[in-house]
Image: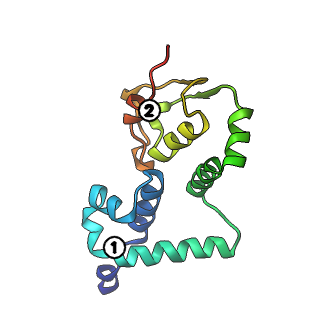
Amino acid sequence: MEAERRSPHRTYAATCCRTAKNANLSLKATLSSQFSGLMRHRRSLAIIFKRYAKAKLSRNCVDYDDLLVHLATLLLRPDIGDTLRKRFEYVLIDEFQDTNRLQFEIIKLLKPDGRGVMVVGDDAQAIYSFRAATVENIRGLPPQR
């Protein structure tokens, strides 16, 4: 029990880490906005996240959230980003209500002006808030003519 008070349960730590990546927020911002009860564990969580990242790197592994982070990083590189932007004339996204901030950033990096993007979504069916999905992304789309 004493150890539980010094560090958060692994389920909460994993959820916090996943949320921070998918919401494209810092640990402090994630704790403040969604996990205020874990704020006292901020230092422990930072250490856990660093150790987790180091363990994945040493094993040459990534998790699902890393795939999104790495894609966004690649799209920011002019040489790779330009190649990918030219490769895809159209992008269709189904279940758009279940995209998170990181996925939305990827869409904007892939199609900065919004041309060639078609989304389908229903804000009444949003179910992926546990992956930091937000229906606010629908409102962030540029209008098309």
The kind of residue tagged 2 is Gln
Quadrant of the frame with the N terminus? bottom left
| Residue placed most toward the observer, 105 or 39 | 105
Q: Are marks 2 and 1 in contact (CB under 8 Å)?
A: no
> Are there few (<14), some (14-19), or many (20+) residues within 10 Å of tag 1?
some
Q: Residue at x 42, y 60 (%)?
A: 15
**Residue 123 occupies which quadrant of the picture?**
top left
Where does the image place residue 99, in percent across and percent down from the top left? 48, 39
**Closest to the observer, 25 or 132:** 25
Above-or-below relation of 54 to 29: below
Give me the C-alpha separation between circle 2 and circle 1. 30 Å
Q: Residue furthest top?
A: 145
Compared to residue 70, the image places residue 59 above or below, namely below
Task: Give the mark, 2 or 1, whose residue is nearer the N terminus.
Answer: 1
Kind of residue indicated by mark 1 = Arg
Q: Which mark is residue 87?
A: none
Give percent across and percent down for residue 5.
29, 80
| 14 versus 90 height, above or below | below
Tell me which residue sits at (42%, 65%) in the image: 11
- Judging by the rendered image, the residue that carries numbered circle 2 is 97
User: Hey, which quadrant is residue 4 in on the image?
Assistant: bottom left
Q: Position of residue 90 (x, y in %)?
A: 66, 25
Q: Count every numbered label the image shows and give the total.
A: 2
Which residue does the image show at 36% across and 78% down from the upper left?
Answer: 43
The residue beneath circle 1 is 42
| Left/right of residue 4 with respect to residue 18 in the rendered view | left
Disc 2: CA contacts within 10 A as few (<14), some (14-19) or many (>=20): many
86 or 117: nearer the viewer? 86
